[in-house]
Amino acid sequence: MRVLSLAGRRLAASIPTLFLILIGVFLLLQFAPGDTVDAMMAQMGGGDAKTAEDLRRFYGLDLSVSAQLASYLWRLVRFDLGFSAIYGKPVATVIAERLPATILLMTASLSFAFFFGLILGVVAARGVNKWPDTLISTVGLIFYATPSFWFGLMAIVVFSIYLQWLPAGGLSDITSTATGIWAVLDTARHLVLPTLTLGLIFLAIYLRIMRASMLEVLNLDFVRTARSKGLDETRIITRHVLRNALLPMVTLIGLQAGTMLGGSVVVESVFSLPGLGRLAYESVVQRDLNTLLGIIFVSALLVITVNFIVDLIYARLDPRITTGA
Amino acid sequence: MEIVRAYFRSPPAVIGLLLLLVVIAMAVSAGWLFPRDPLALAGRPLVWPFTNPRFPLGTDNSGRDIAAQIFYGARISLLIGGVATVIAVAIGIVIGAVSGYYGGWVDNVLMRVTEAFQTLPNFLLLLVLIAVFGSTITTVIVAVGIVSWPAPARLTRAEFLSLRNREFVQAGRTLGLKDLKLIFGEILPNALPPVIVYASVVMAVSILLESALAFLRLSDPNVASWGNLIGLGRDVLRVQWYVSAIPGIAILVTVLAVSLVGQGLNDALNPRLKGR
């Protein structure tokens, strides 16, 4: 219960942050050249000034900036994100259609990066300054420096064009009529390359942090105690060291949630996945500012949610956090 | 000089420095080796690398020399990395210093703003800034700088929090030094080393951010940027994959060089933490 109240307090503290972001971006978008009505008129193939004026009045764009902001925030409280003129649907619907793909991609990449980062970090730390460590650290550095979109393109060249093992894009095979387990497997096959592409840089970061944190914990007194008790090395690592060394890794998930969401913009474009990131890119290109603002809101909400979950995990891993503070 | 010697004792740091010097040499010699406009048509489109001595790295979809674009691209990447980093670190230092030095409500307000910037995915904010202010090379550089300041700010603040009550600061205060002088003249020089080391991370990320933006064709199309070339090569990826492959390697090498130099500096400045 204490865990929940602590994490809940942190959650409540993030509400002002959320409003700060929305107000800031809303005001920023006022400087954008052209508004939604201009974009609509362009899509309709032009129109007279009278129509534009009517449309502006209809969408409330003739009001003062502060009045527009107030009405936007008031609608947000009721989870109404407005209407996307480009897609001809409420923004909330457009985003809801795109959200699952992004969440799927992020979860897969995060699991991949976390799991392999953990293993490689442990292996590197156990043989510190020997060849496995040097190899893993070098590979990590190279992964860290690789632009994700470029890695994605090269992966398409190798695995989709030359070897033809994996599909080059999309979330499922449009010609397939598979259902049930086969449809799931088909989507999984489509997600392999995007997951690797998005996860690569995070894998590099996680393995580096894991290695450092393992080295730190391995030097602590309680590990020496465990060794002198005669425990075997595997047991020391899994039961004693890992739990403590995991803390910085978990912190990093919260810190990197936003970066990962930003990275998915690029990765979803490379693999033409119907996700939130691609929607963000499209709404920038099409000047669909209402949708863009909605995406900002949902992304910030997503980052805050991830951090809430991280707080819960953190408290589970280290009971001192709830009793101490 | 102890630091310099410690730096050169580490092979990765030396390799990083050499790579960085190569990139800098490319940027400097670009105008001399390729006097023509790198974005001008030079020959037949899609010449494979190593087949025509006139175009050692081949030509892209519209017949522009890839080698020339790589050399000029080094200028753009270093320019973006350098200037955006200076902007980000400068904003970060001012906000972090004021926040850490004064504490109280000033700290509260500034940290709320920092938190807001960190909650918003930085690439999304970059997209918003580009959508609003357009995508000339200047706006791209400034925008990249603006989205990257929170981490240096937090680092500076942490340093200031640990330094602000040290004896030398109290001595300065007793001597009647003004706040501004204390912050920038006394505390900042002591808080700077970790921030400078962190600047290498900011620089690596800035180069990657701009290349991603250019790949999405949202950066300045009128400069020879590596990201632009990768985006262009995407259209002919099926067969002429080298158009995308070559500039990607250039980005990889540059970012790797910057990270290695940063890590080398870090190890040289904090010998105790070596190998972490």
Image (cartoon, helix red, strand yellow):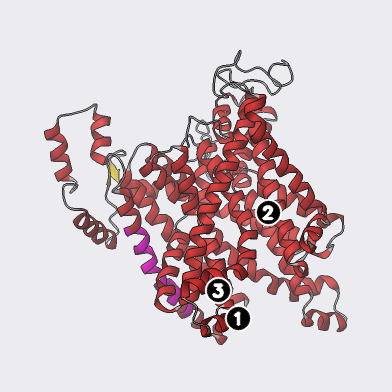
Residue that carries the numbered disc 2 in the rendered image: A204
Front-most of residues A46 and B111: B111
Residue that carries the numbered disc 3 in the rendered image: B160
Q: Looking at the picture, which amino acid does disc 2 mark?
A: Ala
Going from N to C along the chain, the mark reached first, 1 or 3, is 3
Does A228 lie within the magenta span? no
Q: Nearer the viewer, mark 1 or mark 2?
A: 1
Q: Is residue A315 left or right of residue B134?
A: right
Above or below, comparing residue B22 to residue B92 in the picture: above
Tell me if label 1 and label 3 are in contact, CB under 8 Å. no
Secondary structure beneath disc 3? helix
Q: Which chain is indicated by disc 1?
A: B
Residue that carries the numbered disc 1 in the rendered image: B168
Tell me if label 1 and label 2 are in contact, CB under 8 Å. no
Does A13 lie within the magenta span? yes
Label 3 Cα neighbours within 10 Å, binned few <14 / some 14-19 / many ≥20: many
Above or below, comparing residue A170 to residue B113 in the picture: above
Label 1 Cα neighbours within 10 Å, binned few <14 / some 14-19 / many ≥20: some
Q: Quadrant of residue A229?
A: bottom right
Q: Which residues are magenta?
A: A6-23
Q: Main secondary structure of the magenta part?
A: helix
